[in-house]
Image: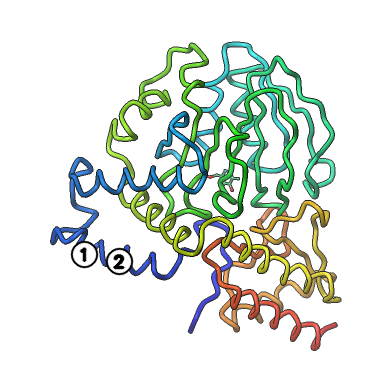
C-alpha cells in the first residue's frame, strides 16, 4: 500500500533519490563497488563532495566568502560548536527562545558566553514567534531557530540585526527562497529536509573563522574542516552522497522558487482544512504558522486515537504529535507530494462527517 510519510525526522526523501541511492549501494559511479565500501579519498567520492558544496552555493547564492562544511554530530553539536568558535570568553551572545531546540542551544551556549535571551514565547507554549525586541550591538551574534519543528511555528520575517545572525535551519533548509546573505552562520541537520541522518551542513562566513580565540580540540574547530574541505577525517560518506542527490533534485524541480510554491500550496491546503473542520484546531498563531510542521489538536481528546487510526488506514503515517505537545503534527517537507496532503484532508473530512 502506498504510504504518505508525514514523519518529522528522519523524514521523507524524493523517490528518485532513493532509487539512485539504492543503485549506488550496489554499484557506485560504474566502479562495480558500493558507495559504502570505497575510500572517501577516491576521485569518485571527491567529485560527490565537490558537487555537494557547489550545490549549496548554487541554492543559497552565497559566494566564496562562505565556507560550506559537512560535519557529523548532528545539529545538537552545533549548539556548542557555534559559541566555542564564535564567542570570546565572557562575551555577550543573544538568543531567542522559540521552542525545544532553541532551548537546547541556549543551554549549551551558557557554557561559553554571557547569554542574553532577548525574547521567549515559552509562556505561550511556544505558539508564536516573538517580535519587537531590541538587539544589543555589542553582542557577538544573535541565534535564531528558523522553524520550530516540535511546536510548528516559523520565522516569516527577520529582525534587523546589527550583529552576526546565526540560524538553526534544520527543519526548513532549502524549503523557500531566502536572502541567505543576511546570515553569517547557518546550520542544519540533514535528516529533516536535506538527506539521511548523519551529516550536518554548516555554512559559515570565512571572516568569522577563529573569532573566539579559544584553544579548541581539532575536530571542534571549524577551521580544521574549512581548510580540509570537510575531509580532515572520514566524513559521513553515504549521508553526504544522498544529500547531494536531494539538492540536485531540488534544482531539477526548478530550484527554491518552485519548491517554495509547492510547500505553500501543501501548507495552505492543510491549514484551510484545519480552520474549516469542526473537529480540529490549529495551535499556532496564524501569522507564525510553519509550512513544514503543521501542528493541530482535536477539539475532543477522545478523537485522538480514532483519527490516527483512520489516518493509518488511508496510508498516512507519522502524524502523532510530539510527546511534549500531543495532538497531531503533519510534516510537509520538500519531498512530500501535494497528493499526500489531499489524502490527509479527505481523511479529515470523512472524520468530521462521522464525528462532527
Ligand atoms: C531535529 C532538530 C535538531 C536536532 O538535530 P540532531 O541532528 O538530532 O541533533 C536541532 N534543531 C532543530 C530545529 C531540529 O528540528
Q: Residue at x 59, y 58 (%)?
A: 257
Q: Along the horizontal axis of the image, is 206 left or right of 168?
A: left
Circle 2: element type: helix
The residue tagged 2 is 22
Frontmost residue, 311 versus 154: 154
Q: Residue at x 54, y 21 (%)?
A: 86
Please identify the quadrant where the C terminus is shown. Answer: bottom right
Q: Residue at x 71, y 46 (%)?
A: 155
Q: Are marks 1 and 2 in contact (CB under 8 Å)?
A: yes
- Label 1 vs label 2: CA separation? 7 Å
Circle 1: element type: helix
The residue tagged 1 is 26
Q: Residue at x 76, y 64 (%)?
A: 296
Is 311 located above or below residue 14 in the figure? below
Percent across and percent down for residue 328 are: 70, 65
Is 75 located above or below residue 86 in the figure? below
Amino acid at each position: 500500500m502506498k504510504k504518505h510519510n508525514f514523519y518529522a525526522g528522519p523524514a521523507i526523501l524524493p523517490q528518485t533519490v532513493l532509487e539512485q541511492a539504492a543503485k549506488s549501494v550496489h554499484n557506485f559511479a560504474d566502479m562495480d563497488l558500493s558507495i559504502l565500501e570505497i575510500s572517501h579519498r577516491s576521485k569518485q567520492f571527491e567529485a560527490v563532495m565537490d558537487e555537494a558544496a557547489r550545490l549549496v552555493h548554487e541554492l543559497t547564492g552565497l559566494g566564496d566568502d562562505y565556507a560550506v562544511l559537512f560535519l557529523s554530530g548532528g545539529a545538537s553539536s552545533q549548539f556548542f560548536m557555534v559559541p566555542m568558535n564564535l564567542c570570546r570568553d565572557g562575551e555577550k551572545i543573544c538568543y531567542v527562545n522559540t521552542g525545544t531546540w532553541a532551548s537546547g542551544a541556549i543551554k549549551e551556549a551558557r557554557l561559553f558566553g554571557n547569554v542574553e535571551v532577548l525574547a521567549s514565547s515559552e509562556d505561550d507554549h511556544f505558539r508564536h514567534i516573538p517580535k519587537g525586541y531590541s538587539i544589543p550591538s555589542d553582542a557577538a551574534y544573535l541565534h535564531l531557530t528558523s522553524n520550530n519543528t516540535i511546536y510548528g511555528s516559523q520565522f516569516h520575517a527577520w529582525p534587523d540585526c546589527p550583529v552576526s545572525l546565526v540560524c538553526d535551519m534544520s527543519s526548513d533548509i532549502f524549503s523557500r527562497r531566502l536572502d541567505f546573505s543576511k546570515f553569517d552562520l547557518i546550520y542544519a541537520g540533514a535528516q529533516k529536509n536535506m538527506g539521511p541522518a548523519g551529516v550536518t551542513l554548516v555554512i559559515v562566513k570565512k571572516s568569522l573563522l577563529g573569532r573566539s580565540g579559544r584553544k579548541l580540540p581539532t575536530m571542534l574547530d571549524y577551521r580544521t574542516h574549512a581548510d580540509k574541505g570537510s575531509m580532515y577525517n572520514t566524513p559521513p560518506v553515504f549521508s553526504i552522497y544522498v544529500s547531494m542527490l536531494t539538492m540536485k533534485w531540488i534544482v531539477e524541480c526548478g530550484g527554491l522558487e518552485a519548491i517554495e510554491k509547492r510547500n505553500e500550496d501543501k501548507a495552505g491546503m492543510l491549514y484551510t482544512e484545519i480552520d474549516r473542520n469542526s473537529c480540529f484546531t490549529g495551535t499556532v498563531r496564524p501569522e507564525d504558522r510553519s509550512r513544514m510542521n503543521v501542528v493541530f489538536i482535536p477539539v475532543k481528546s477522545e478523537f485522538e486515537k480514532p483519527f490516527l487510526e483512520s489516518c493509518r488506514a488511508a496510508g498516512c503515517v507519522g502524524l502523532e504529535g510530539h510527546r511534549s505537545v500531543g495532538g497531531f503534527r503533519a510534516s510537509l517537507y520538500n519531498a512530500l507530494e501535494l497528493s499526500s496532503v489531499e489524502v490527509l484532508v479527505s481523511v479529515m473530512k470523512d472524520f468530521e462527517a462521522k464525528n462532527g
